[in-house]
């Protein structure tokens, strides 16, 4: 199994949510528990400082569009 690489979602209704590719075509949609979300000077999440996430849903992203 490949590691999960988080992606930022650009749709307005997905503000502050991220996605992780699962087995195609599914994605895991989640939000970090930390508020504010720890970021570096480039605005990227510092994943090692995020200790919990809320799973929003698992979706077939291609059918959502």
Image (cartoon, grey):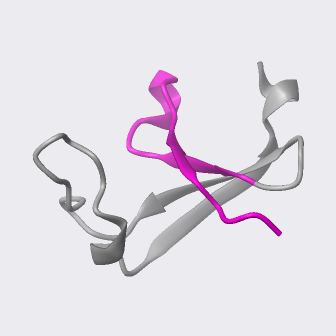
Image coords of residue 45 (percent x, y)? 30, 54
Residue at image coords 59%, 48%: 19
User: In the rendered structure, which segment of residues is drawn in magenta?
Assistant: 1-21
> Residue 8 magenta-drawn?
yes
Which residue reaches farthest left? 41
Q: Quadrant of residue 28?
A: bottom right
> Residue 47 magenta-drawn?
no
Q: Is residue 27 above or below residue 33?
A: above
1 relative to 33 in the view: left or right: right
Residue at image coords 52%, 23%: 11
- Front-most of residues 27 and 46: 46
Image coords of residue 32 (percent x, y)? 40, 64
23 relative to 39 in the view: left or right: right
Which residue reaches farthest top? 65
- Image quarter where the N terminus lies is bottom right
23 relative to 13 in the view: left or right: right
38 relative to 62 in the view: left or right: left
- Front-most of residues 5 and 55: 5
- Front-most of residues 5 and 61: 5
Q: Is residue 48 above or below residue 43?
A: below
Residue at image coords 41%, 36%: 15
Residue at image coords 84%, 27%: 62
Q: Is residue 23 above or below residue 2?
A: above
Q: Quadrant of residue 64?
A: top right
Image coords of residue 54 (percent x, y)? 52, 68
Which residue reaches farthest bottom? 51
């Amino acid at each position: 199994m490949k590691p999960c690489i988080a992606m930022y979602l650009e749709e307005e209704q997905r503000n502050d949510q991220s996605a992780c590719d699962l087995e195609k075509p599914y994605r895991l949609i989640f939000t970090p528990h930390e508020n504010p979300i720890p970021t570096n000077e480039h605005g990227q999440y510092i994943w090692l400082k995020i200790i919990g996430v809320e799973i929003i849903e698992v979706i077939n992203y291609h059918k959502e569009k």
